[in-house]
Amino acid sequence: MDDKMYSVEAVADLLGLHVRTVRGYIRSGRLKAVRIGKQYRIARADLEELTGKPESATERPAAALVEVSSIVQVDDVDRRTADRLSTLVLSAAQSGSDPGQPLHIQVVHEEKRRMKIVILGGAAATAEVLQLIEAVLGEGGLLGREADGD
């Protein structure tokens, strides 16, 4: 692997861009760089990632990225149950199996005893969270039994 590092000026010359444009790419996160003192240095791999050129001709293209968005609505749920379900779902997302494609989950509990769970992430990880929700809330599920006992 080539460990060559480029300055902002060198990258600008290579790409035919203005130095300010390259710095803007770095600040926005579009181009990865390391700050050494007051200057940025860009690794060859990061430059190739920006331009879309593969590091070597022998590499296979990466598998297509699949992202799923799901909205789960749970009606007639009290605050205590919503808090417990929220904690469970968020914990499951944090312990996900693929760090390269983390799950993003947002939970909202409305005053009308309605809860919404928004899930964004890979298909397999999203399916696991949906199965967990079904297991917990479905007929005979853990939280389903508590509601029956109250």
Image: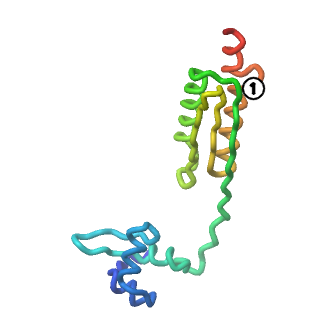
Residue located 71% across and 22% down the image? 141
Where's the C terminus, which quadrant? top right
Mark 1, secondary structure of its residue: loop
Is 102 rendered above or below residue 17? above
The residue drawn where x is 67% and y is 40% is 128
Instruction: Measuring from the top left, give residue 12's x and y in whole percent.
Output: 39, 86
Q: Amino acid at mark 1?
A: Gly
In the rendered structure, the answer to whether residue 20 lies left or right of residue 102 reads left
Q: Give the vertical position of 35 relative to 10 (above or below).
A: above
Q: Which residue ends up furthest to the left in the rendered image?
A: 37
Is residue 40 rendered to the left or right of residue 135?
Answer: left
**Residue 47, image x and y in percent?**
45, 77
Towards the viewer: 81 or 60 = 81
Quarter residue 89 falls in: top right
Q: Quadrant of the N terminus?
A: bottom left
Q: In terms of image quadrants, where is residue 19?
A: bottom left
Query: Residue at point 46% right, 74% down?
Result: 45
Q: Which residue is at 52% across, 41% downward?
A: 94
Seen as rendered, the residue at the extreme front is: 112
Callout count: 1
Question: Which residue is label 1 attached to?
Answer: 138
Pick the residue in front: 29 or 52.
Answer: 29
- Image coordinates of residue 143 in percent, x first then y, are 66, 20
